[in-house]
Image: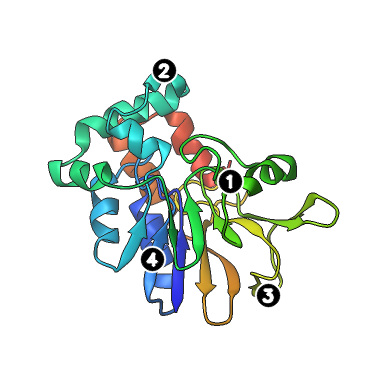
Amino acid sequence: MHYLIISDVHANLVALEAVLADAPSFDQIWCLGDLVGYGPNPNECVERIQDFDHVSLAGNHDWAALGKLDLRSFNTDARTANLWTQSELKPSVREYLQQLPTHREVDGFYVAHASPREPVWEYVLDANMAYLNFPHFSTTVCLVGHTHVPIIFELDEERQRCETSVPPFSESRLIGERRAIINPGSVGQPRDGDPRASYALLDLDGMTWDHRRVTYPIEITQERMRARGLPPRLIDRLEMGR
């Protein structure tokens, strides 16, 4: 089985389409949350993923769009974008987001939007935070999103610490020999200094992880955001990957 692993699309339809066009053949999509928020095409992104066999999770921005989180916990720009998203969601899209879980186990992998310990909000940004999360899932590998940064944390049980790998990876990575927490990065709003859409391919037969980047016409998404009156800082950051 071959899976397309995506996260944090953030209503960036142009980036999502670029990923779908770039990815080789796959059997199913696993989306690790935040299909909406920040970007200009929330309804279209939710509808597009439903064209495929998929597993999807709810992220903090998905919950915010549903009014399930206090928007005062978001920064000003995110709050503004979430209020706009709330006003734009179709009833069918709202219903779809409403039924999404924040975490689950699928085909022997634990998947969560943010972290195993706190699936909606906690950021796993470094090895110390990753180490604290390993007791909170029982599978060998956990997949998360939320940080918008592609990374692999592998548990060294003998030394009781995590080892960190960051892209670019020179080739497909063999996974499953050690416990790991893996993040594919963000499709719609990367924050690792690389503005290209980030995603991954998981080959369950060979237990390999292939991290990929694809260029997309950022200016189209930016123009759509301007037309909808979304915050300038959110528009500018797309081309910086920050």
Q: Secondary structure at mark 2?
A: helix
Q: Nearer the viewer, mark 4 or mark 1?
A: 1
Question: Which residue is label 2 attached to?
Answer: 72
For label 2, count other residues whose C-alpha is less than 10 Å away and answer few (under 14), some (14-19) or many (20+).
Answer: few
Estimate the spatial distance between the alpha carbons at disc 3 and disc 4, rounded to whole Å: 21 Å
Please report contact status of discs 3 and 4: CB closer than 8 Å, yes or no.
no
Look at the picture and state if 74 lies above or below 200: above
Q: Which amino acid type is shown beneath numbered disc 1?
A: His
Q: Nearer the viewer, residue 184 or 112?
A: 112
For residue 138, which quarter of the picture?
A: bottom right
Considering every residue shown, the one lying at the far top of the view is 72
Q: Which residue is mark 3?
A: 171
Residue that carries the numbered disc 4 in the rendered image: 29
Decide which of tag 3 and tag 4 comes sooner along the chain.
4
The residue positioned 38% from the left and 22% from the top of the image is 71
User: Which residue ends up furthest to the left in the rendered image?
Assistant: 91
Q: Earlier in the sequence, mark 1 or mark 2?
A: 2
Residue positioned 51% across, 70% down in the render: 201
